[in-house]
């Protein structure tokens, strides 16, 4: 699949960054290094020292620069080389000695970077993940050889929960039957949201803990090309799941799942209990999804298998239209860039 660029991507959560330890990542084919300086400034550059082209992530952070572990060349957050230890005394570092640095935004407890044409940056947006600024959350990363579009839809696919997650989620998020469901879709050019209710069929313990309401309100959203949301409103509590996904290379996608909660574990306020518990649960849920994402047999040629959609797949139908028109726009932008370069 062609890489989808000209977008803001979640490079990492702030919690992942430790001073002196550079963090390597690969996003839409770009090898990056993320680092936090002594003053707290965060930089994202290509993971390459332009001296001998080794990974900067093999080095360390000192003061306001990242220092290559091979010969000690130093770079600031703008990608400019600020020190070459082997230069004779009195000589200045040439201005041409620099590497690519990426635009950075700190938002929703994460480091977001823009990858693509600077002239198109104003068209790209960061999803509204406000819950991460308010609620405790855990996160996990998973790589998988899977179809990016299928991964993008997997979180808010309303009908798979009863089947794929019968051993982990079971019934506590509610179930759907054969009734006609109104998903109350709001579809815009590059994002969509919706809302529906699930039947509360939890055990007596689950109902006592989460609430006895007959219906569980469920909200969801998608922001092209990388973020999906599932928002569960129990009568007593609330759980919000985000999934952020992108191509690592042509064969592999990366999925970062973030699970936030309000009052889910308020009876157990000890941080050493609630976060490990939620992390184990989240990992289990994602692993169940990945089995099917990796197994998908969508074949793109004329003679291959295609999805057969039915009336209850209304969300999938609208999502597919949104995905295809934005993917086409992404391709058109690349063609314009190529023509400009020629």
Image (cartoon, helix red, strand yellow):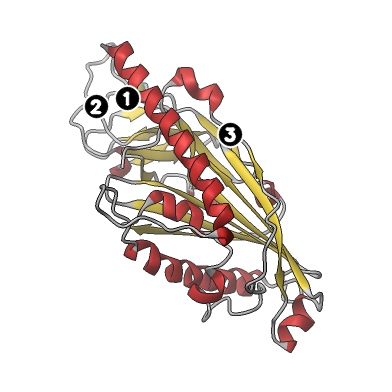
Expressed as whole percent of the image width and height from the top left, the position of residue 340 reads 33, 11
Q: Is residue 94 above or below residue 326?
A: above
Front tag of 1 and 3? 3
How packed mark 3 is, by other alpha carbons closer than 10 Å (few <14, some 14-19, many 20 or more), is few
Label 2 to label 1, Cα distance in Å?
A: 7 Å
State the separation of the CA atoms marked 1 and 3: 35 Å
Q: Please report whichever mark, 1 or 3, sits nearer to the chain's N-terminal start.
A: 1
Tag count in the figure? Answer: 3
Residue that carries the numbered disc 3 in the rendered image: 189
Q: Nearer the viewer, residue 134 or 313?
A: 313
Marks 2/1 in contact by CB < 8 Å: the verdict is yes
Q: Secondary structure at mark 1?
A: loop
Drawn side of residue 250 relative to residue 240, left or right: left
Whether 4 is drawn above or below 306: the answer is above
Foreground tag (3 vs 2): 3
Vertical arrangement, residue 109 with respect to residue 30, above or below: below
Question: Is 101 on the left or on the right of 104, as rendered?
Answer: left
The residue wearing badge 2 is 50
Q: Return the mark for residue 78.
A: none
Q: Residue at x 63, y 79 (%)?
A: 171
Q: Is residue 8 visible?
A: yes
Element carrying mark 2: loop
Q: Residue at x 27, y 45 (%)?
A: 250
| Mark 2 vs 1, N-terminal side | 2
């Amino acid at each position: 699949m062609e890489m989808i660029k000209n977008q803001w991507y979640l490079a990492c959560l702030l919690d992942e960054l430790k001073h002196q330890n550079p963090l390597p990542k690969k996003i839409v084919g770009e090898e990056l290094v993320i680092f936090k300086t002594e003053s707290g400034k965060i930089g994202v550059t290509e993971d390459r020292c332009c001296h001998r082209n080794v990974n900067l992530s093999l080095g360390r952070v000192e003061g306001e620069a990242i220092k290559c572990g091979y010969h000690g060349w130093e770079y600031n957050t703008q990608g400019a080389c600020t020190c070459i230890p082997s230069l004779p005394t009195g000589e200045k570092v040439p201005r041409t000695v620099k590497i690519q640095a990426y635009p950075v935004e700190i938002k929703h407890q994460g480091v977001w970077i823009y990858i693509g044409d600077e002239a198109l940056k104003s068209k790209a947006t960061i999803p509204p993940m406000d819950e991460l600024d308010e609620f405790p959350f855990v996160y996990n990363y998973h790589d998988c050889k899977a179809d990016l579009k299928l991964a993008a839809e997997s979180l808010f696919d309303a009908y798979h929960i009863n089947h794929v997650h019968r051993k982990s989620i079971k019934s506590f998020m509610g179930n759907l039957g054969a009734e006609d469901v109104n998903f109350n879709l709001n579809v815009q050019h590059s994002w969509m949201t919706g809302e529906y209710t699930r039947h509360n069929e939890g055990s007596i313990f689950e109902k006592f803990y989460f609430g006895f309401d007959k219906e569980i309100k469920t909200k969801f959203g998608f922001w092209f090309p990388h973020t999906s949301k599932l928002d569960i409103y129990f009568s007593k509590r609330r759980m919000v799941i985000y999934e952020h996904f992108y191509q690592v290379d042509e064969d592999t996608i990366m999925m970062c799942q973030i699970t936030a909660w309000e009052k889910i574990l308020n009876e157990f306020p000890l941080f050493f209990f609630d976060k490990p518990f939620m992390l184990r649960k989240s990992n289990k849920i994602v692993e169940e999804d990945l089995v099917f994402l990796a197994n998908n047999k969508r074949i793109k040629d004329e003679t291959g298998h295609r999805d057969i959609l039915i009336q209850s797949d209304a969300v999938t139908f609208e999502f597919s239209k949104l995905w295809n028109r934005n993917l086409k726009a992404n391709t058109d932008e690349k063609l314009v860039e190529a023509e400009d370069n020629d």
